Image (spheres, rainbow, N blue to C red):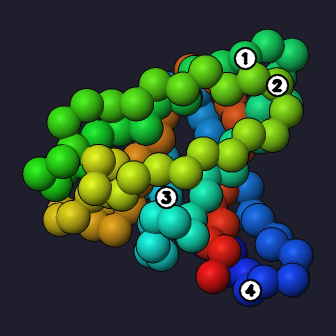
Amino acid sequence: MALTMRNTIAEVTLEALTANTAKAIAWNEKDEHTVLVISNAGNTATDLTVKAGNGIQGVTDLVLTVPKGVSLVKLESGRFKNVSGTNKGKVIVVSTGTPSVGVVALV
């Protein structure tokens, strides 16, 4: 996860997803500072599912239609962050396509 202060460039490392394969992404900062960056280089939109976390608020997945280009999403960690187990402190995403994803925290 890239951390950036005010008045500086936020450099984000994006990781390419493999279609229909879950990817765990660290989600360590406060929700109001953290943004999921999605880059879809394909010619058509693709679906990205943010899996429900294993905490008390994690009851349903969120399915997003990601257009071509770069998109940003602020997530509520109570719904999507895992609070225990192998993926503790992480959000799980799965895509039908092959977009790239990364996280930036603006602190």
* Amino acid, disc 2: Lys
Q: Is residue 15 visible?
A: no
* Amino acid, disc 1: Ala
Of callouts 4 and 2, the N-terminal one: 4
Q: Are marks 1 and 2 in contact (CB under 8 Å)?
A: yes
Of callouts 1 and 2, the N-terminal one: 1
| Disc 1 element | loop
Mark 4 residue crowding within 10 angstroms, few (<14) / some (14–19) / many (20+): few
Of callouts 3 and 4, the N-terminal one: 4
* Amino acid, disc 3: Ile
C-alpha gap between disc 3 and disc 4:
21 Å
Of callouts 4 and 1, the N-terminal one: 4
Residue at label 1?
A: 45
| Disc 2 element | loop
Mark 2 residue crowding within 10 angstroms, few (<14) / some (14–19) / many (20+): some
Most extreme residue toward the left, as rendered? 56
